[in-house]
Structures are given as C-alpha cells and as structure tokens.
C-alpha cells in the first residue's frame, strides 16, 4: 500500500465534515480512497478525490470542549461533531491510537448504528491502514475523524437480544421480519422494532460465539451471507443494504487492534445492527433469479470486477466490491462476484 498517496488523500479530506448536504449524506471519501490504494489503484486516487470532494461540507466548528467529565452528555449529539473531532484529534496526538481505540470502542459500540453504520465502517478502514502502518500519524488523525462521527451520531438499537440460537448467519437472516412501514428515516423505521412480532427471536436465533477465538469465523460467515443476500435482496434499497455486508467486515478487520474481551460483544452488536437494517430496508421477496446477473467465470473475473468498480466510481460500489472480492477470495462462491456486478447495475450512473 502506498502510504504517501493515501496520506495525501486523507489530508485533502481532513477539513471536511463526516456528512454533507441538507440530507446529511455520509462523506465516503476517506473510506473509498483506502480501498483504491489497497487494491492497487493509486493512480486513480487524486482524480477520484477531485470528482468527489467538491460536494462536501466543511467540518463544523467546535462549540464546547469534550472531556472525561462531559462526554456522555455529548454522545449522539450531531450538532457537536466539531467538538468530538477536536477531542479525538487531541487523543490520538497524545496517546497511542490503539489505546484510544481500546477505551472508546466499548463506549461507542452500543451506538454502532451511527450514520446507519457508516461510522464504524470509517473507523474500520482507518484501522486497516494503521495495522499496515502503525506509526502513520495522518491515518491516526483519520481514525480520530471516524471516532468523532461515531460519537456525534451514536444510535442504539431500540431493542435487541443476545445471540443464543443454533442458526448460521444465512439462516438467521432469512428469519428476520420486516417492519410494517419501510418508509421514512432510519430512526422512524427502527422505532417500529419494539412491537415487531418475531424480532427478538430472530436476533437471538444466531449461533453465538462462546469464546473470542470463534468470533473471526462467525464474522466472516456473516459477511459472506450478507454479501450473497445482497444479490437477491439489494434492489429495494441498493445503497443502505450494502452496509449489512460492509459494516461487519469493518468490525472483522478491526478485531486485531482490539482487546480480545471486546470481540464477542462486537459480534453481537454488529449482528443486531445489521438485522435492524435488514428489517427496516430489505424487501420480503427475493428478485427472480433470471433477472439477476451471472457471475463472470473467466480466470481474470476477480480482477475485472474490481476494475469495473473503479471505473464506475461510485463510493458504495467501490466499498461493496472490495468486500465482495474478499468473500470470493475466501469462499470461491461465484455469487459474490455476481453481487458486485449487481450493485454496479443498481447504482448505474
């Protein structure tokens, strides 16, 4: 990975806010450029940033410093994202980034739905950079921005349950009920979960990880299942539903930087969040198989799918294709590449 080019891109995004526009769309810039560099497309980074960055808003100004005595009252206050950014920027400048992450991950984990899981995804991409380049101060500053977004937009599940069943992720996802009205913002949709018949049982049906050693494989299976499910169910909300795969993948790649005692609760939290997104946005009926793209089957299929995502340029296409490529590499399942083709078609420009 070329740290110089990625750091230049991170610096270009440093003064931008985590959201932009009246609809508070998420700033995906730092996440997408991390994928481009890691996948060997450094030559596309600056051109991609040039095309993307003009839409972004500036990072809001700080209002009141956040510290150990008052952080709880600022949690979930989107108007204080500038305060959170100042706080975490100071933290990673004064302490090793791993220490900051270890302290704040369990504090932020109950609100992992922040930004419809975009915050934990942004943190995950920054951690991947830091795990490859531990002393990278620019990447640590990007981690601070991701944590600030998470703190400001912290959003907890209205009701959930701990996994205690015997179902694999694909089977458990098939049991998730849908909210009565899949309309409106995410808070309104998730607000229907407490009265939704079968919701707690569906979340509890997942086979739990009994020890930290079991968590990586459980997360991999969740990412695999969500990626394949996107092929058949992603059409109802093509943007939001990519996060049922990319969010657990972000947690998976953050595990090596976390204390092991945080691994099991991380699996439980991200599973509940992904099930909540599924309940709120996913259609009941799968798309007909004959309406879905076939996976490319030639020897260079994986390479060509990644190239096509980069050429397409959409930030969600780039990030989801990165996850789908990992799933294909891990499992050899051709539908992972078909899912990457599907997201590109659904988000055609």
Image: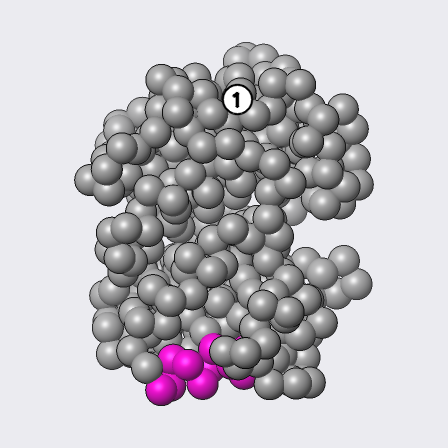
Residue 253 in sight in this render: no
Quadrant where the image shows the N terminus: bottom left
Left/right placement of residue 279 relative to residue 79 reads left
Could you say where residue 86 lies in the image, as x and y percent from the top left?
A: 54, 83
- Magenta stretch: dominant SS? helix
Residue at image x 24%, y 42%?
212
Residue at image x 50%, y 72%?
145
Left/right placement of residue 146 relative to residue 54 reads left
Q: Under tag 1, what secondary structure? A: helix
265 and 281: which is toward the camera? 265
Could you say where residue 24 lies in the image, as x and y percent from the top left?
A: 71, 61
Figure quadrant of residue 283 = top right
Residue at image x 53%, y 13%?
289
Could you say where residue 125 lies in the image, as x and y percent from the top left?
A: 39, 60
Q: Which residues are magenta?
A: 85-94
201 and 63: which is toward the camera? 201
321 and 89: which is toward the camera? 89
Left/right placement of residue 336 relative to residue 159 reads left
Most extreme residue toward the left is: 213
Residue 276 in sight in this render: yes
- Check the image and report above or below for 337 versus 109: above
Q: Is residue 87 magenta?
A: yes
What colour scheme does the image use? one colour
Figure quadrant of residue 235 = top right
Could you say where residue 15 lies in the image, as x and y percent from the top left?
A: 57, 81
Q: Is residue 215 magenta?
A: no
Mark 1 Cα-neighbour bin, 10 Å: few <14, some 14–19, many ≥20: many
Residue at image x 69%, y 85%?
63
Number of marks? 1
The residue pinned by badge 1 equals: 202
């Amino acid at each position: 990975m070329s740290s110089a080019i990625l750091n230049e891109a991170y610096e270009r995004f440093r003064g931008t806010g985590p959201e932009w526009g009246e609809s508070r769309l998420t700033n995906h810039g730092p996440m997408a450029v991390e994928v481009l560099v890691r996948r060997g497309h450094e030559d596309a980074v600056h051109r991609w940033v040039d095309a993307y960055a003009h839409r972004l808003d500036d990072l809001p100004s700080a209002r009141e410093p956040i510290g150990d005595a008052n952080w709880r009252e600022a949690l979930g206050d989107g108007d204080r994202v500038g305060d959170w950014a100042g706080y975490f920027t100071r933290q990673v400048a004064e302490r090793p980034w791993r220490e900051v992450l270890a302290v704040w991950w369990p504090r932020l984990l109950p609100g992992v739905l922040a930004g419809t899981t975009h915050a934990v995804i942004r943190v995950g991409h920054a951690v991947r950079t830091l795990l490859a380049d531990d002393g990278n101060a620019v990447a640590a500053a990007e981690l601070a921005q991701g944590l600030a977004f998470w703190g400001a937009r912290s959003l907890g599940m209205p009701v959930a349950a701990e996994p205690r069943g015997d179902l694999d992720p694909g089977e458990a996802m098939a049991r998730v009920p849908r909210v009565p009205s899949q309309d409106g913002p995410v808070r309104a949709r998730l607000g229907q979960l407490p009265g939704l018949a079968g919701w707690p049982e569906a979340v509890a049906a997942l086979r739990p990880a009994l020890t930290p050693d079991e968590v990586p494989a459980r997360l991999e299976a969740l990412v695999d299942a969500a990626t394949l499910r996107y092929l058949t169910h992603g059409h109802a909300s093509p943007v939001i539903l990519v996060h049922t795969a990319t969010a657990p993948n972000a947690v998976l790649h953050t595990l090596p930087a976390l204390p092991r005692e945080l691994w099991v609760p991380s699996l439980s939290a991200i599973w509940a969040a992904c099930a909540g997104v599924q309940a709120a946005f996913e259609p009941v009926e799968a798309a007909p198989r004959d309406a879905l793209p076939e996976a490319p089957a030639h020897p260079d299929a994986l390479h060509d799918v990644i190239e096509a995502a980069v050429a397409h340029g959409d930030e969600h296409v780039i990030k989801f294709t990165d996850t789908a490529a990992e799933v294909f590499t891990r499992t050899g399942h051709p539908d992972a590449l078909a899912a990457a083709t599907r997201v590109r078609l659904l988000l055609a420009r």
